């Protein structure tokens, strides 16, 4: 699992003093306005370096060193806590967790029967005091002994009711954070009001909670993870809060109407063995990327009140709980450029060029920026420090600028005023800009796509030949391929008799491809292989597709009103290309499919019913084996659809079946979570044997 993390090397006393100063300043910013200039990874390395130096040189330890203190000793408060609000000690690996468990067992002199395991929410700790069921005060953690009153923020926090379900006096503790959507909304509101964007959801929550009198409203979310008696709590409830296990307290808190992790994909669970603990850690880690709120680890607590009482507290953290830290997923780096690229459909999309930075184990140099409006909305500037993370684990995204690191040297990002490829005008009427020449602007890219393996699969038609054909004006789109002559090909560089004959045969062969491949080759925006198969199956013939209106498209699985509109428009735009293909003799029907009945007509026999996967939504993940060995993901998806199922790439509550090969990872964890049937590639092959 996670490696033991590295640390900043601190060589001498002066470097040590400087490191302490940097860490204290960063902590003050982090817990204050939420505007630290260090990302968590850099900060944690620094603090570990400080701790290591102090270990070696106890005589040099400075009084304001952050080690061993809640919030690094960098914040103070004036509202005393009833019971200290502590931090958590950390482990970074399964071995570290085992050692910690063993240490606690030794300390108590007995086994610990039950643990509770919950996500470590990445926001800020809050104490919410209720009197007679009404929320009366909100206090931050501060230095652990006293915090800051932020009661003014109560109305902005979802999940923190102003009135509990019962008129009890109690203190709830939990985390306030912003979900991804709340963060996006907050930044839209903030940049709209002329203020710089928040760097990330955590700092947005911290900054927003403390701010008073802002011109705009933002929303945050509360997750409770504890409850305590207060002065005035009735004795029966106080006794329950003292005696219930942590898991029981969480049930009580939920029953009072406060938000807990129970309804999230990563609810708290209880466990009794170390294996179960590490298993749950792996599960939560696997689900992390798909959550709509940030977590930075997993918290493991001795569940029973007696175990907690006996383990006690250190000055900084309880001894009965531990945070299993997950590696930081967000890094700060610099935005050094923005490239504007024209895609195969003529869409002009910006891409961020970054100072290379390691994010979750790989070096990131480019990141997605959706469109010009998105850049403006985030208030990004060239030269900005930016926060970067991987969305859904793979695509690096620029989250936001780190506005307080600006030096004044940053430059506005210039959007192109003409198509960066051909110099023609830009159609900027839609959010996503497009060259007015559309697909013909980047003909090479659209032809390359059309002849690719999952579309027309024309072997021997490499990029170099396509480039030459387009440059020589022999083709303007892929339909022109079908009227190329032998002499035209022979004229090209490095095309001899044999390769020309082979290529002509391959082009001829492509005319017989099923409709789904021909349709996919068109490269309709937002329509990949799987959607193309569904459309081809549904309509059975190109004429039916061309005749379909938005309503008819919505009969296709997965097509909503917006996409249906876009499909109608795109197909109209592609009419000349489709006509050319038709005239060249390219197949326009889907074998085995029957067209939908015309309005008013009796529906034909539902052929799909008898198929083994009829009505099922199927996801394949991991390495395929057995009879499926060597099949690409797309080929597996084709198989699923031939057998009547619907292939999907992500696991959700709608998924009926997961085909999980070796190394299935997060999709498997999610499917287990959702109680979805999971089968091996071999079992799957048996079910669909007739369609292999
Ligand atoms: N970037 C910076 O400049 C900077 C500065 C200071 C601290 N930090 C980051 O803050 C972290 C250390 O902060 P910390 O001392 O507040 O500790 P912590 O955040 O690692 O752990 C303690 C906190 O975890 C929270 N928590 C979340 N889920 C919980 C749950 N289920 N049960 C109990 N508590 C839960 C609580 O708010 C609690 O106060 C480090 O990861 C560090 O990187 C960063
Ligand atoms: Zn162009």
Image (cartoon, grey):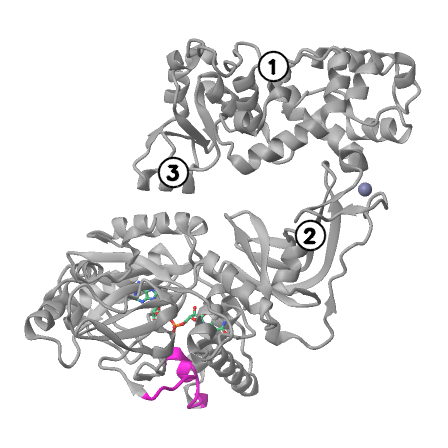
What residue do we see at 67% from left, 25% from top?
521
Label pair 2/1, CB-CB below 8 angstroms: no
Start-end of magenta stretch: 60-78
| Label 2 residue SS | strand
**Is 143 located above or below residue 295 in the figure?**
below
The answer to whether residue 404 is left or right of residue 655 is right
The answer to whether residue 349 is left or right of residue 605 is right
The majority secondary structure of the magenta stretch comes to: loop
Per the image, the residue denoted by label 2 is 351
The extreme left residue here reads 236
| Label 3 residue SS | helix
The local crowd at label 1, few if under 14, some if 14 to 19, many if 20 or more residues have their Cα within 10 Å, is many
The answer to whether residue 467 is left or right of residue 574 is right
The local crowd at label 2, few if under 14, some if 14 to 19, many if 20 or more residues have their Cα within 10 Å, is some
Q: CA distance from mark 2 to mark 1?
A: 38 Å
Question: Upstream in the sequence, badge 3 or badge 2?
Answer: 2
**Is 68 located above or below residue 3 in the figure?**
below
Residue 475 visible here: yes
What residue do we see at 35% from left, 72% from top?
154
Question: Upstream in the sequence, badge 2 or badge 1?
Answer: 2
Q: Position of residue 271 (x, y in %)?
A: 22, 52
Seen from the viewer's position, the closer of residues 556 and 515 is: 556
The answer to whether residue 652 is left or right of residue 552 is left
Per the image, the residue denoted by label 3 is 668
Per the image, the residue denoted by label 1 is 541
Disc 2: residue Cβ within 8 A of ligand 2's nearest atom: no
Q: CA distance from mark 3 to mark 2?
A: 32 Å
Which of discs 2 and 1 lies nearer the camera? The answer is: 1
- The label shown at residue 247 is none
Q: Quadrant of residue 65?
A: bottom left
């Amino acid at each position: 699992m996670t490696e033991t993390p590295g640390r900043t090397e601190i060589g001498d006393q002066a470097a040590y003093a400087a490191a302490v100063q940097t860490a204290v300043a960063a902590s003050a910013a982090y817990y204050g306005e939420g505007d630290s200039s260090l990302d968590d990874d850099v900060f944690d390395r620094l603090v570990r370096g400080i701790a290591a130096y102090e270990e070696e040189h106890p005589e040099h330890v400075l009084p304001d060193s952050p080690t061993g203190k809640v919030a690094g000793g960098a914040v103070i408060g004036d509202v005393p806590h009833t019971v200290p609000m502590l931090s958590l000690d950390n482990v970074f690996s399964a071995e570290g967790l085992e050692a910690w468990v063993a240490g606690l067992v030794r300390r108590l002199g007995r086994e610990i029967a039950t643990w509770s395991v919950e996500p470590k929410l990445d926001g800020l700790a809050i104490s919410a005091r209720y009197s007679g069921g009404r929320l009366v005060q909100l206090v931050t953690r501060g230095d652990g002994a006293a915090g800051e009153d932020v009661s003014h923020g109560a109305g902005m926090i979802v999940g923190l009711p102003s009135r509990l379900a019962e008129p009890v006096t109690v203190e709830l503790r939990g985390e306030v954070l912003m979900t991804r959507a709340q963060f996006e909304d907050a930044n839209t509101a903030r940049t709209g009001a002329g203020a710089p964007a928040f760097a990330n959801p955590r700092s947005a929550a911290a900054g927003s909670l403390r701010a008073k009198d802002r011109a705009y409203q933002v929303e945050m979310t509360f997750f409770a993870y504890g409850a305590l008696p207060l002065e005035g709590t009735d004795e029966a409830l106080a006794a329950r809060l003292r005696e219930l296990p942590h898991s029981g307290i969480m049930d009580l808190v939920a029953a009072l109407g406060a938000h807990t992790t129970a309804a999230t994909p990563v609810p708290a669970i209880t466990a009794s063995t170390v294996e179960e603990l590490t298993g749950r850690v792996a599960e939560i880690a696997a689900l992390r990327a798909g959550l709509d709120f940030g977590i930075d680890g997993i918290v493991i607590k001795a569940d029973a009140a007696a175990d907690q009482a006996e383990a006690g507290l250190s000055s900084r953290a309880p001894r009965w709980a531990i945070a299993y830290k997950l590696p930081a997923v967000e890094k700060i780096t610099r935005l050094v450029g923005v490239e504007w690229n024209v895609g195969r459909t003529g869409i002009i999309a910006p891409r961020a060029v970054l100072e290379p930075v390691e994010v979750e184990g790989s070096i990131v140099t480019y990141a997605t920026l959706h469109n010009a409006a998105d850049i403006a909305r985030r208030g990004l500037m060239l030269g900005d420090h930016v926060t970067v993370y991987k969305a859904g684990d793979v695509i690096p995204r620029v989250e936001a600028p780190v506005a307080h690191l600006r030096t004044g040297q940053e430059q506005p990002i210039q959007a192109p005023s003409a198509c960066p490829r051909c110099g023609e005008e830009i159609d900027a009427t839609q959010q996503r800009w497009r060259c007015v020449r559309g697909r013909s602007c980047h003909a090479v890219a659209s032809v390359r796509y059309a002849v690719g393996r999952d579309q027309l699969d024309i072997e021997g038609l490499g990029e170099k030949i396509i480039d030459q054909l387009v440059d020589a004006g022999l083709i303007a789109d892929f339909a022109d391929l079908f009227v190329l002559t032998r002499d035209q090909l022979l004229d090209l560089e490095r095309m001899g008799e044999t390769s020309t004959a082979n290529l002509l045969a391959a082009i001829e062969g492509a005319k017989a491809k099923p409709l789904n491949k021909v349709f996919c080759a068109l490269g309709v925006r937002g329509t990949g292989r799987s959607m193309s198969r569904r459309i081809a199956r549904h309509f059975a013939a190109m004429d039916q597709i061309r005749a379909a209106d938005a309503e008819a498209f919505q009969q296709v699985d997965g097509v909503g009103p917006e996409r249906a509109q876009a499909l109608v428009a795109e197909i109209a735009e592609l009419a000349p290309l489709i006509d050319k293909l038709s005239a060249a003799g390219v197949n326009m029907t889907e074998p085995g499919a029957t067209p939908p009945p015309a309005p008013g007509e009796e529906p034909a026999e539902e052929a799909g019913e008898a198929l083994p996967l009829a009505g099922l939504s199927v996801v394949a993940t991991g390495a395929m084996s057995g009879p499926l060995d060597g099949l690409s993901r797309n080929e597996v998806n084709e198989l699923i659809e031939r057998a009547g199922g619907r292939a999907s790439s992500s696991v959700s509550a709608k998924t009926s079946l997961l085909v999980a090969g070796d190394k299935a990872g997060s999709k498997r964890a999610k499917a287990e979570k959702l109680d979805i049937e999971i089968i091996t590639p071999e079992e799957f092959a048996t079910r669909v044997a007739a369609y292999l």
